[in-house]
Amino acid sequence: MAFINKLDLVFDNYFMSDKPLILVTNDDGIFSPGIKHLVEIAKQFGEVVVVAPDKPQSGMGHAITINSTLRLEKTNYHKTTIELACNGTPVDCVKMAVNNILKKRPDLVVSGINHGSNSSINVIYSGTMSAAIEGALEGSPSIGFSLCDYALEADFESSTQHLKKIIEFALKNKMPKGVCYNVNIPKLRTEDIKGIKFVRQAKANWVERFDERKDPYGRSYFWLTGEFVNFEPEATDTDEYALSQGYISVVPTQVDLTAHQHLMEVKNKL
């Protein structure tokens, strides 16, 4: 990979196409199999730009880099005209792409495909979904894709046709400003995936503990462990239920964390 500077970021001819401009990023790193598969799908819908972390950034949430420098390096792994590895977080990648690299706002931002689920509360911690949320904040329709399989040999091909439908839907139908889609794919064969369901985020959480161990010098160190618990297993309108039934779940997600119901209650009491 070659280090680039401002003079290299001149891609005017690239944007003469009438095709949609699609920005692809992730949190598993620019060389991960998930993003490779997503890029190949995205190429069928428009002009693809890849700006992704140069190393895994899972669990970074919406972190941004403010205490060190950011660098970009050219790669040719995905065979796209603009393809850059960034030493920052997934959100850094989106911010750099939109504000410093691209000559126009992306028509679509897609993030993933992540190794592992980002359903329910996992959306809070996910670098994959934070990149998609940042895309929405920057004014572009955005989608985060995750496959519920942590295996290195995970089958990203099984859901290809369904992911195409979701991307096509997002490009053709105007999404509300600030909203992105959180898409989770069950670990199933193509023929076993029943379809796509738009649902809400399940009420679930991690029951966590820190496993304490000793290093060779007798000093304590800790590994974060825990168990994911769905607190409404009987609800049939959630992402967790859809996944358990063999459907791809799509949750419209936004950054507004205001407790609107409580806000109204407080206003009424005062």
Image (cartoon, rainbow, N blue to C red):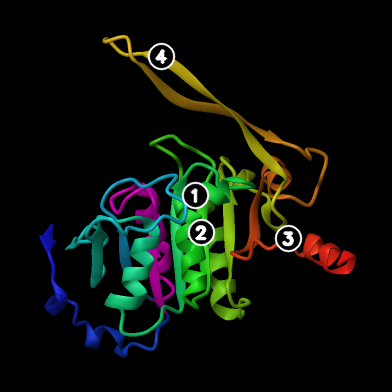
Q: Amino acid at mark 4?
A: Arg
In whole angstroms, how far apart are the C-alphas of marks 1 and 3? 21 Å
Q: Secondary structure at mark 4?
A: strand
Q: Earlier in the sequence, mark 2 or mark 4?
A: 2
In whole angstroms, how far apart are the C-alphas of marks 4 and 3? 39 Å
Q: Earlier in the sequence, mark 3 or mark 2?
A: 2
Residue positioned 65% across, 38% down in the render = 205
Q: Which residues are magenta?
A: 21-46
The residue that mark 1 highlights is 126
Q: Amino acid at mark 1?
A: Ser
The residue that mark 2 highlights is 144
Question: How many other residues sit within 10 Å of disc 1, few (<14), some (14-19) or many (≥20)?
Answer: many
In whole angstroms, how far apart are the C-alphas of marks 2 and 1? 10 Å
**Is 60 within the magenta?**
no
Question: How many other residues sit within 10 Å of disc 4, few (<14), some (14-19) or many (≥20)?
Answer: few
In whole angstroms, how far apart are the C-alphas of marks 3 and 2? 24 Å
Question: How many other residues sit within 10 Å of disc 2, few (<14), some (14-19) or many (≥20)?
Answer: many
Q: Quadrant of residue 240?
A: top right
Label for residue 213? 4
Q: Earlier in the sequence, mark 1 or mark 3?
A: 1
Marks 2/4 in contact by CB < 8 Å: the verdict is no
Q: Report x, y in % for residue 241.
A: 73, 44
Which quadrant of the figure contains the C terminus? bottom right
Residue positioned 39% across, 37% down in the render = 153
Q: Amino acid at mark 2?
A: Gly
The residue that mark 3 highlights is 259
Nearer mark to the viewer, of 3 and 2: 3
Q: Amino acid at mark 3?
A: Ala
Residue positioned 31% across, 13% down in the render = 215
Q: Quadrant of residue 71?
A: bottom left
Q: Earlier in the sequence, mark 2 or mark 1?
A: 1
